[in-house]
Image (spheres, rainbow, N blue to C red):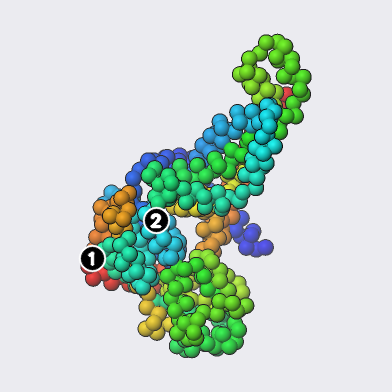
Amino acid sequence: MSLFIDGFNEALQLLASGNDSVYSAIAVTITVSSWSLLISLLIGLPLGFLLGYYNFPSKPVVRTIVDTLLALPTVVIGLIAYTMLSRSGFFGSFDLLFSQKAIIIGQIVLGTPIVIALTATQVESIDKRLYLSLKGLGANKWQILLTTLVEARFGLMTAAMTAYGRIVTEIGISMMVGGNIKYHTRTITTAIALETGKGEFVTGIALGLVLFIIALMVNIILSVLKRKWV
Amino acid sequence: MKKILLSTVLAAAVATTSLMAKDLMMATTTSTDNTGLLDYLAPKFQKDTGTTLKWVATGTGKALKMGSNCDVDILFVHAPASEKKFVNTGYGVDRRQVMYNDFVIIGPKQDPAHVTGLAPSKALEKIKENKSNFFSRGDNSGTNKKEISLWKKAMAKAPEKAAWYVQTGQGMLRTINMAAEKNGYTMTDRGTWIKYQSQKGDKNPMKIVVEGDKSLFNQYSVITINQEKCSKVQPKLAKQFSDWIVKDSTQKVIADFRLLGKALFIPNANK
């Protein structure tokens, strides 16, 4: 227990002292995960809408595939991304391995199925009469898409949050395709793994605290937004 | 608060520029990273040459693999036999010795297997007889390869299946920490051991039990990845680094890298 309490105290001091390797890991995490979430949303929201809104013969198959992707461990995604992005791999000529872009790509693979699956569920759960009234009022496809997404906004925010939570806390992808390079691709989670591995538990706890604070802030923002929009 | 904001902004700036900058990419062993040697050398290299050094710290085995996948420009590793093989396959060129230290077997202060001062193979035999926990990296790193060769010398092969032979699959410092928690023995390079000592101070439950044998010598070298095999690598930047690290002034800098007053690595470049 004393290890934890000492760690906690020293962690606060470390954070207050502005330790540059700690802040660089924080900055990398925020930069990378924001991009990943943004792109996952851009891809996932429309696809999720299509999946939830339309009925087509292969729908159960697609649904199963999306749901299976949700269960992929991040190290597996990391491993696949690694073999693709390696210079001896399929996309090797783009020279992406061990860069922040590589982490972003891996995290998009992680985040997009979450956004698709949750969006589809939200869209499906919306009152069917909405579509009928919209059609009756002469709305076109895009207007239906937009209105539905607005109607489902809380559910979609939850989808985005869930995706963000998974992206920000994942370690397998960042470690494998990022390479945990100090000041460049070292994220909060890979830094925690490294520091605890070296026995530097204090730094690990400091970084864990930061991750907690990020999660807390995102949730506060979300609840404020919800209240405003009701 | 201002300081925190400032450092976040600075870090963000660093993070963003790294999205485009072209830097020297190195794969290296955990000891050069865990000890802080590369953290100490990289800024000096940057200052002298203007090139940024980025490194991925892993076992020597995986580092060599990264080399043959063409994913890095240079290797900084310590498993001479595997390195020579790597050079013979044509992936590596211009292997140069940089520095050395030695391996030591460390164990609990009470030394339950009574191996203190023995020769390495004798010590391993006694650890086996006593069924004391032995923590192996088990990750194909240079240290792991050396450790397995010592087991082979002591008995026909490493006791892979024995319950007391624990393969951690993790880096050196983490493996030492595991051995310390579980009252076991392990083999490490002296640099990482000194780093561990400096972290633990008075609370250190471990001590060196075996050292000084000729077979425990630990040579570190740099190897440039051959551009003929890997068109994307940057041999010029790699050469810049390997010229730099064998230079007298840098060799002196390595000798000056100390913890608790002890040198972690001893430079021995013969250019």
Observer-side mark, 2 or 1, equals 2
Residue B74: in sight, yes or no? Answer: yes
Q: Residue at x 37, y 54 (%)?
A: B70
Q: Residue at x 49, y 84 (%)?
A: B156
Callout 2 touching callout 1 (CB < 8 Å) = no
Nearer the observer, B71 or B190: B71
Q: Is residue B20 left or right of residue A122?
A: left
Q: Quadrant of residue B65?
A: bottom left
Q: Is residue A140 left or right of residue B15?
A: right
Give the image location of residue B247, x and y in percent: 23, 63
Q: Quadrant of residue B10?
A: top left
Mark 1 is on which residue type? Asp
Which residue does the numbered mark 1 point to in the structure image? B248
Q: Residue at x 63, y 18 (%)?
A: A141
Q: Circle 1 — which element? A: helix
C-alpha gap between disc 2 and disc 1: 32 Å
Residue A182: in sight, yes or no? Answer: no
Compared to B217, does B246 lie above or below? above
Mark 1 surroundings within 10 Å by alpha-carbon count, few (fewer than 14), some (14 through 19), many (20 or more): some
Which residue does the numbered mark 2 point to in the structure image? B69
Mark 2 is on which residue type? Asn
Compared to B103, does A173 lie above or below? above
